[in-house]
Image (cartoon, rainbow, N blue to C red):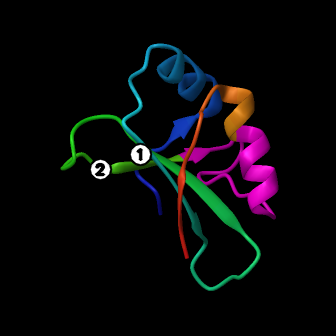
Amino acid sequence: MIGEAIQSDTLKALVSQHAVREVVVGRVAGTDSKWTLSIRLGGPTARLLPVRSRREPLRTWSSLTAVGRFAEAVGLTGFSVEL
C-alpha cells in the first residue's frame, strides 16, 4: 500500500511554484496497459511521490498519451518514462 502520495490539486500548486525536481512515468507492476506518474520534490536522494486520485491511493492512466494530457493540464513540461 502506498503511504504517501500527492493529489493533482497539490501537484498543480507545486508545479506553479517550481518545486517539482523530477517527473517519472512508469508501468504498474504486472500490467502492460496501466501507467502511473510520480514526482520528486527534493534533491536526488528524495523519494518519488506517486499521484493519487481522490478515491484511490494510486492514480493510473490507460496510455502515455493520457498521462501526457494530464501532465500538460497541471503545467508539467516533460517527464521521463521507465519501462
Q: Is residue 56 magenta?
A: yes
Instruction: Please report whichever mark, 1 or 2, sits nearer to the chain's N-terminal start.
Output: 1
Direction from residue 43 to residue 33 in the image, left or right: right
Amino acid type assigned to the residue bearing label 1 in the image: Glu
Q: Name the kind of residue labelled 2 in the image.
A: Arg
Task: Give the image location of residue 49, x and y in percent.
Answer: 42, 47
Q: Which residues are magenta?
A: 51-70
- Determine whether the residue tagged by mark 1 lies in a helix, strand or loop: loop
Sort mark 1 into few (<14), some (14-19) or many (20+) by Cα contacts within 10 Å: few
Q: Residues within 10 Å of mark 2 (few under 14, many from 20)?
A: few
Residue at 68% x, 82% y is 31
In the picture, which quadrant includes the C terminus?
bottom right
The numbered disc on residue 47 is 2
In the rendered view, tell whether residue 69 sits above or below residue 30: above
Residue 7: x percent and y percent? 59, 34
Q: Measured along the vertical axis of the image, is residue 63 above or below residue 53?
A: below
Magenta-drawn stretch contains 62: yes
Q: Camera-side residue: 67 or 47?
A: 67
User: In this view of the protein, can residue 47 be seen by the observer?
Assistant: yes
Residue at the disc numbered 1: 4
| Residue under the point 63% across and 32% down | 8
Q: Residue furthest bottom?
A: 30
CA distance separating discs 1 and 2 = 10 Å
Where is residue 66 shown, x and y percent of the image?
81, 52
Q: Are marks 1 and 2 in contact (CB under 8 Å)?
A: yes
